Amino acid sequence: MRKNDLYLFAGDLQMKKLLSVFLISGILITGAFAQDLNGVTDGVEAIMTGITQDIAPNLQMIALSGNIVGDATIDHYMFYIPSLGFSFSDGLGNIMRPGAKQWDQVNFPELIDKKMGSGSTQDTIHAIESKIFAYPAMKIGFGMGFMNDMDFIVSGMYFPKAISEAAIGQAGEPISKIGLSFDAMNFGIEVRKSFLKDANHIPALSFGLLYNYGGFNMNLNNFSLSDLVKEGIQISGQSLNLAGSINSSYSVHNFGFDLHTSKHLGFFTPYAKFSEVYQYAIATTDTNMKATLGDSFTVNIKGKPEVVISDFSSLFTLGYEINCKIFILNSNTMIDLGRAKLDISNFSLSGITTRGFTVNTGIRWQF
């Protein structure tokens, strides 16, 4: 082999070695980035699944809240508009509490703490995540008595998506850009038979059969992490972005009966009710997002965790009414006897822990 050919051969060999090194390095780097993005993907999917699992057990209480009928019997007519109920649970995202999960690449609880700083805002976020969360419900209702000491009550409310879109549109950027909207509805009917009428020292007593439906849908159609976190999130020296949609759907059917007693004591009427209710609930979160690291490394995040609950619950309601002649003011608390928990030893927003409780209040006209 001539000397020039030897040089060419050596140069070609060296070039191939360098090319091999670059290729191997590229494969390793790409693999490292993909591993990082897989960690992010796992984290987002875990959050969505965790939130879905937290909401599902509370669907029954949410659907039944807003009930402000205190009298065990209705003589003529009754209606209320509006009533308000709050069902309390032990957090909306328990997966975010410290130690709940080993986060691979992005520690989402630490990220939220960093963005929220300290003080009341951080306390509120922590309370929503794992301490106390209130689900609101509003209802209007109508009822009447008819022959053979029977009466029936119909209630419900629909909250259209257009109202939520209009309200969120006034929030300003970046919130208005993420495409957040929701709608909710509930419907209930109960037929009761009176066995005792309120008279002298005898309280009223009735037995009722009930059905109640509750549904809630939430859509996040234009989510972008880079829009919400302006300074960005860095992984391996690259900027991370999450973008896409999250659509959640929750529905529950309640079938059951209740025993209801009440006693008029002048303008004050205490009452109590025991309910046995069968619940069939479905909670689903459909995630369709992309995680992008730098300019070109992308991983799809797709998941649709579904939680189905089918069981019986025993509920106890204790309340009172104040008759103001023109209207009746009602307030009550409903307790799930199997799930109820209340800890107020640390009486602060981020310290109270509760679940299985609902409080209701409202004004009713009855004549």
Image: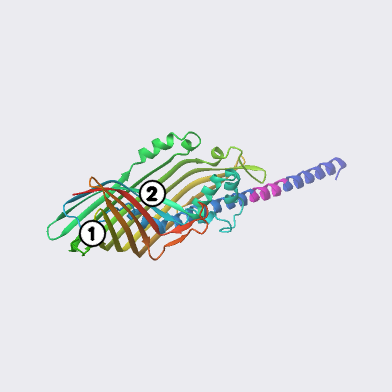
The front one of 250 and 187 is: 187
Amino acid at pointer 2:
Pro
The quarter of the rendered structure image containing the N terminus is top right
Which mark sits nearer the N-terminus, 1 or 2? 1
Q: Which residues are magenta?
A: 22-32
Based on the displayed image, in which of its 4 quarters is residue 202 positioned? bottom left
Identified at 16% across, 52% down, the residue is: 76
Residue designated by label 1? 72
The front one of 285 and 156 is: 156
The front one of 239 and 64 is: 64
Q: Please tell me whether residue 98 is drawn above or below residue 218 in the rendered image.
A: below
Identified at 47% across, 49% down, the residue is: 287
Residue designated by label 2? 136
Count of marks, rendered view: 2
Identified at 37% across, 61% down, the residue is: 335
Helix, strand or loop status at disc 2: strand
Based on the displayed image, in which of its 4 quarters is residue 232 positioned? top right
Query: Is 28 inside the magenta-drawn segment?
Result: yes
Based on the displayed image, in which of its 4 quarters is residue 266 positioned? bottom left
The front one of 153 and 73 is: 73
Query: Is 107 inside the magenta-drawn segment?
Result: no
Residue 141 located left or right of residue 218 = left
| Mark linked to residue 93 | none
